Image (tube, rainbow, N blue to C red):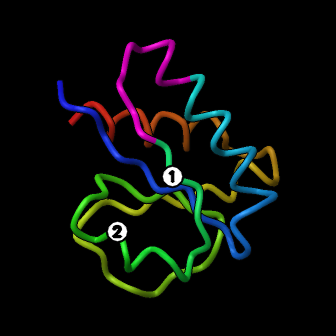
Amino acid sequence: MAKKQVLVACGAGIATSTVVNGAIEEMAKENNLDVDLVQIKISEVGGYVDTADLLVTTAMTQKEYPFPVINARSFLTGIGTDATKKEILTALQK
């Protein structure tokens, strides 16, 4: 299976994306998935449209991208985290 590039974006590209980054890293290890995690600001996503396989974000985005976009706000609230993780995992296993 090819390595998947996963963009992890929040408004500033620092705090919340670090939490999400860690969670995805853990899931990838547990499921033997090869991922390339790129932590960025939501404003930088456009620069990755040709290479990314998935966007996981805690920020709001109205833009359309050629890859799935998963809302990871549950990582901030702690509510529904398992459902979000399942969604990320499903997207990575495609």
* Nearer-N-terminus badge (2/1): 1
Q: Where is residue 38 in the image (x, y as percent from the top left)?
A: 51, 52
Q: Position of residue 25 (x, y in %)?
A: 57, 29
Camera-side residue of 65 and 71? 65
The reply to whether dot 2 and dot 1 touch (C-beta < 8 Å) is yes
- Which mark is on residue 38? 1
**Vertically, is 34 above or below 90?**
above
Magenta run includes residue 19: no
Q: How far apart are marks 2 and 1 (CA)?
A: 10 Å
Name the residue located 53 percent from the left edge and 24 percent from the top edge.
27
Camera-side residue of 48 and 33? 48
- Which mark is on residue 48? 2
**Vertically, is 93 above or below 74?**
above
First to last magenta residue range = 27-36
The quarter of the rendered structure image containing the C terminus is top left
In the shown orientation, is residue 59 left or right of residue 2?
A: right
Q: Quadrant of residue 52?
A: bottom left
Name the residue located 73 percent from the left edge and 48 percent from the top edge.
18
Camera-side residue of 16 and 78? 16
In the shown orientation, is residue 26 left or right of residue 76?
A: left
| Element on which disc 2 rests | helix
